[in-house]
Amino acid sequence: MLKRILAGFIVVIMLVSATIAGPFEDGVAADKHGDYVEAAKSYRLAADQGHAKAQFNLGHMYATGLGVPQDYVEAMKCFRLAARPR
């Protein structure tokens, strides 16, 4: 009986955690759909929380002008943040 309850609890936890996406995952999804403005907003949220991949992706967006005005100085700021040791 306890094993079934525990197994059910684990399944529920897995399902809930799989449906919760953070700002980085939202940015990746928007990026894949070509919604670069929304991707930049989501990456910015994750980057401000210290997410290195989001910082890099946001830097790429600034370097290429996808979803944000092209700005090499801002791109380098993002790339430097992404490259910092954690």
Image (cartoon, helix red, strand yellow):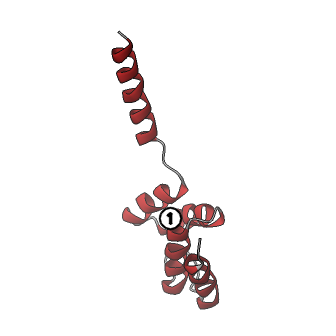
How dense is the environment of label 1, judged by Cα within 10 Å: few (below 14), some, or many (20 and up)? many
Q: Quadrant of residue 46?
A: bottom right
User: Residue 9 occupies which quadrant of the picture?
Assistant: top left
Residues 7 and 81: in front is 7
SS assignment at label 1 = helix
> Can you name the residue that lies furthest to the bottom here?
72
Q: Amino acid at mark 1?
A: Ala
Image quadrant for the N terminus?
top left
Q: Which residue is mark 1?
A: 39
Q: Position of residue 41 (x, y in %)?
A: 58, 64
Find residue 80 and report its horizontal and vertical position in percent. Answer: 60, 83
Considering every residue shown, the one lying at the far front of the view is 2
Task: Report the residue at 50% width, 64% height from top.
Answer: 39
Indicate the position of residue 24 as horizontal and vertical percent values: 51, 59
Query: Nearest the camera: 2 or 53?
Result: 2
Q: Specify whether 5 is left or right of 56.
A: left
Image quadrant for the C terminus? bottom right
Viewer-proximal residue among 71 and 60: 60
Residue 67 seen? no
Q: Is residue 74 left or right of residue 4?
A: right
Residue drawn 61% across the image and 78% down it: 81
Residue 3, image quadrant: top left
In the rendered view, does 78 fall on the left or right side of 57? Answer: right
Residue 72 is at least partly visible in this image: yes
